[in-house]
Image: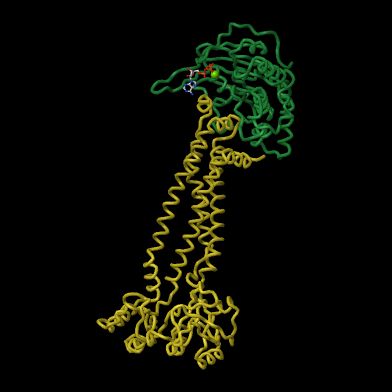
Chain colours: A yellow, B green
Amino acid sequence: MGTFHLIRKNLTRKKLRTTFTLLSIIIAFLLFALLGGLSRAFSLGVELAGADRLVTMHRVSFIQPIPVSYVNRIQSIEGVETALHQTWFGAYYQDNRQQMGLFPTDLETFREVYPEYSIPDDQWQRLLNNQTGILVGQAMAEDYDWEVGDRIPMFSSIFPQQDGSFSWDMDVEAIFTGSGNNADEMQIFMHYDYFNEARAFGTDTVGWIVTKIEDPDQADQVAEAIDQRFANSPTETKSSTEAGWTASFAAQIGNIGLMVQMVLGCVFFTLLLITGNTMAQAVRERTSELAVLKTIGFSDRRVLWMVLGESLLVAIIGGVIGLLLGYLFIQGAANALSQFLPGLAMSWDAALIGLVLAAGLGVVTGILPAWQAGRLKVIDALARG
Amino acid sequence: MNDAAKQAGTDQRPIIEVSGVTKSFRKGREQVEVLHQLDLNIERGEFCAMMGPSGSGKTTLLNLIGGLDRPTAGQIAVSGQRIDQLTSRQLAKWRSNHVGFIFQFYNLMPVLTAQRNVELPLLLKKMSGKERSQRARTALEIVGLQDRARHLPRELSGGQEQRVAIARAIVSDPDVLLADEPTGDLDRETASEILDLLKTLNQRHDKTILMVTHDPVAADYASRTVHMDKGRLADAVPMKSAGGAQ
Ligand SMILES: Nc1ncnc2c1ncn2[C@@H]1O[C@H](COP(=O)(O)OP(=O)(O)OP(=O)(O)O)[C@@H](O)[C@H]1O
Ligand SMILES: [Mg+2]
């Protein structure tokens, strides 16, 4: 038997109480992991999107289309290098619950605007020569087992063809790989012309326009110039950097980072009270036992460490279980949400912070009872019985 | 278990020497003196009973001798070592080597088995787990509880609990056992079994015992009885003829 045995036995003396404490710690750390993963996913998008690209969309909402003619008008604005339009196709393949990121776009200029995607030259040529050809991200192609040359029956949940069919045939002609972890390989790009000529409504409109600018430092001025140009027209626009766009998207859902911190703050504050109270109670009940240990010759410091060890043990066990559960949840969710939140993952940093937090919780909740236990005078404690 | 005997040959000083000990407690604003200039010698191998009215200071004196507290003034030496000047850290270490305590209410750890309770003091010593449990088993055999080793305190009777507590007190082989009303919570028959056990420890295992009791029958088991009254020892009662191990 070691001191550890004693600590363990003390923890299991009130099984129900220890279980509840453990559960509340587990849940807190599960929340920590989940919310941390989510806010990371959102902020990743914000940090990583290109700073030299502007996104122009309908002033009111990004689901309202804008005229394709805007592309040329933006092109002529000073400071603009190239402009590229994109549209949300509402694609699904086989499973209509699984929306895919498929965008009709101007593939000829695509490469200029997105240099971070690399595409083999021969595939690129095939793509440009085939109107029904599509450009697929490597990860997407692997997920669905597609290869160059495959014909894919794709569906749109938004756009029917002129014959009323929602089914669109597409040929995988090129596969791109992204460099850098901001490159989202879970995307597909198709020829806008094919899409535009065949669709039943919305002809000559696009979803939004991505503008590559000459100088990132001029982003705000160029964005303003663009919006200025379309002011007082039937379709006014709103432009911002891609980073800003992702951020404003996040802002629509609420300031996630702050919310996460507030929720976690509340959770951990409550946890501190619960666990702290439990520890204090556990020590109070055991006053005479602690006194006996001291009588036997356990030093004050040793008794202090024993009590601290107890609260550390609970906090770390609960923390590790909670973080593990959180990791498993996030892994599961990451697969299901890979198109929407490519950055959803638990980072090593988060895990480490979680562990430090758990240890901190153990120390903070244990230090006061431990200190009291260490200071306890044998004769007083035994006289009290 | 023969450290005591070994030392006895070389050291003829009393094993417990209390001289001029005063102890005061702070009660609110004022200091209350509980023990006044007290002297007491206990020879190696004695089984000494201490009686006296409630509040006369018996427990206070026992705690001082056991190094649980320090006197306000005066000197205390046990086995030739002055303990009145030790720091509380030094005292803790000293206690683990030199005294065993036995309380009225046993004070066992409810979550540990009898065996593990007895092993507790050995946690402070550098020894293998195997040696620890071996020693604890020996101690349990001495108190006649080897077959209850795996029981929890709540599965034992009061007398058995007290035996476990005694085993815990002797497991690290101290010279001195200090018992504060060890039979105070037991019926007469069980009490006499415990007292027989203490007497055996005194006679066969060379333990010097100082026992506080309110019960004259219990005091009869001792080789000497001292009387405490209002913080002073009344040594009116003569020593009984030679007791102890020699
Ligand atoms: N820690 C303490 N603080 C203040 N006063 C104390 C403390 N311990 C003991 N006393 C006081 O010292 C006096 C002697 O107490 P002590 O416990 O030594 O008596 P006792 O002889 O053991 O009595 P009993 O037979 O009832 O156990 C009492 O008046 C008690 O109130
Ligand atoms: Mg007393």
Ligand 2, image quadrant it occupies? top right
- What is the quadrant of residue A50 in the picture? bottom left
Residue at 56% in and 23% down:
B63
Asked if residue B91 shows in the view, the reply is no
Question: If the image is split into quadrants, where does the N terminus of chain B sit?
Answer: top right
Count of numbered marks: 0
Asked if residue A292 shows in the view, the reply is yes
Query: Image check: A304 left or right of B16?
Result: left
Q: Residue furthest left?
A: A232
Q: Is residue B151 above or below residue B179?
A: below
Q: Is residue A308 above or below residue B231?
A: below
- Residue B26 coordinates in the image, percent (x, y): 43, 23
Question: If the image is split into quadrants, where does the C terminus of chain B sit?
Answer: top right
- Residue A236 coordinates in the image, percent (x, y): 29, 80
Residue at 57% in and 20% down:
B62
Residue at 54% in and 33% down:
A286
- Residue B184 coordinates in the image, percent (x, y): 60, 18
- What is the quadrant of residue B147 in the picture? top right
Query: Image check: A19 left or right of B171?
Result: left
| Nearer to the camera, A35 or A196 | A196
Q: Is residue A330 above or below residue B91?
A: below
Q: Residue furthest front?
A: A164
| Nearer to the camera, A350 or A256 | A256
- What is the quadrant of residue B189 in the picture? top right
| Nearer to the camera, B201 or B68 | B201
Query: Image check: B178 left or right of A109?
Result: right
| Nearer to the camera, B1 or A153 | A153
- Residue A314 coordinates in the image, percent (x, y): 55, 46
Residue at 52% in and 22% down:
B71
